[in-house]
Amino acid sequence: MNREKNHEESRNRNHFNDQESNRDNRNFVHQQRVNNQPRYAEQKNEISEKNLARHVANIKPFTGIISEYASFRNIMAEYLESETVSLVVRRDTLMQKISGEAAVQKSILDDPGKAIDITMKNLDRTYKRKGSTTIRNQFEKVIVTDENIDAFIKSLALSKSLHDKILEEEPHCFGHHSIKALLGRMPDAVRRMCNRMLRDETLSTEKIYEKAEEHLDNQIEDAEITGKSTNQTRVSRDQQH
């Protein structure tokens, strides 16, 4: 009997030791993960930086074409903020990526940081403003019409697309005058839907588009009820989204 008791105690001790060993292993693995997190983060950042540098190396130089400036600037701005690449290399890369008509915007200062700042300011002053002005001129010429559903879909999509592009360049550019002007280019039904918000001074360009979409939905529903809708109308709207 004593032998069985001793055997049971030995088995319990072994089981307890196994549990402790497993717990120690789990704690060790967890601690290793915690200790390695900064290294993993650094490796991830290094990979991201390398991908960005490769992407920058492959983009074509900016030559002064206004429509290409926004995408060029977005890529270069991210690259120029990189802390793993020296200022000199960043400066040299920027200068290599500017040519043609835009080359006159390059700074000739020796200080790489100042050269980058001045070059980007020169480019923004010349091309960012021009781009916004061109898009705004196009935007202000678009009349949203509800004469028929297809025309409504296309004109509303064009207006909204240009509106969003302007907001990307100038996030706070739509003031009270711009809101009223946009409303004036909308169908009568949309203007009526927005009149109260206009009087309360709670109207925004986003709300105008929401009401325009609501009016378009009503038009499509009416057309389906009366049998005037076509598959082409539904296809057209799907393509706009």
Image (tube, grey):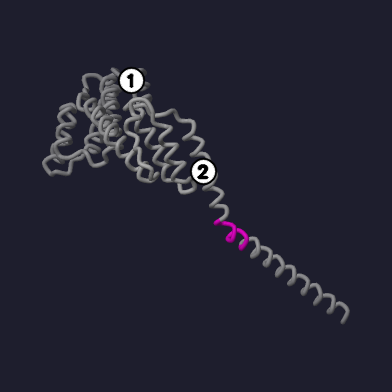
Determine which quarter of the picture holds residue 236: top left
Is residue 32 magenta-colored? Answer: yes
- Percent across and percent down for residue 16 are 73, 72
Nearest the eye: 173 or 164: 173
User: Which quadrant, please, contains the C terminus?
Assistant: top left
- Furthest residue in direction left, as rendered: 199
Q: Residue at x 34, y 29 (%)?
A: 102
Give the alpha-carbon distance from disc 1 to disc 2, as whole Å. 44 Å
User: Which quadrant, please, contains the N terminus?
Assistant: bottom right
Q: Is residue 219 left or right of residue 53?
A: left
- Percent across and percent down for residue 32 are 63, 60
Q: Is residue 81 left or right of residue 139?
A: right
In what element is the residue under mark 1? helix
Is residue 202 magenta-colored? Answer: no
Determine which quarter of the picture holds residue 105: top left
The amino acid marked with disc number 1 is Thr
Q: Which label number is shown at residue 233?
A: 1
- Percent across and percent down for residue 127 are 29, 31
Of circles 1 and 2, the one toward us is 2
In what element is the residue under mark 2? helix
Q: Residue at x 88, y 79 (%)?
A: 3
Q: Residue at x 74, y 71 (%)?
A: 17
> Magenta stretch mostly in which secondary structure?
helix
Nearest the eye: 105 or 213: 105
- Give the crowd class for mark 2: few <14, some 14-19, many >=20 residues within 10 Å: few
Nearest the eye: 212 or 115: 115
Q: For mark 2, what is the residue?
A: 48
Magenta stretch in the rendered image? 31-38
Q: Which label number is shown at residue 94?
A: none
Residue 1 seen in the figure: no
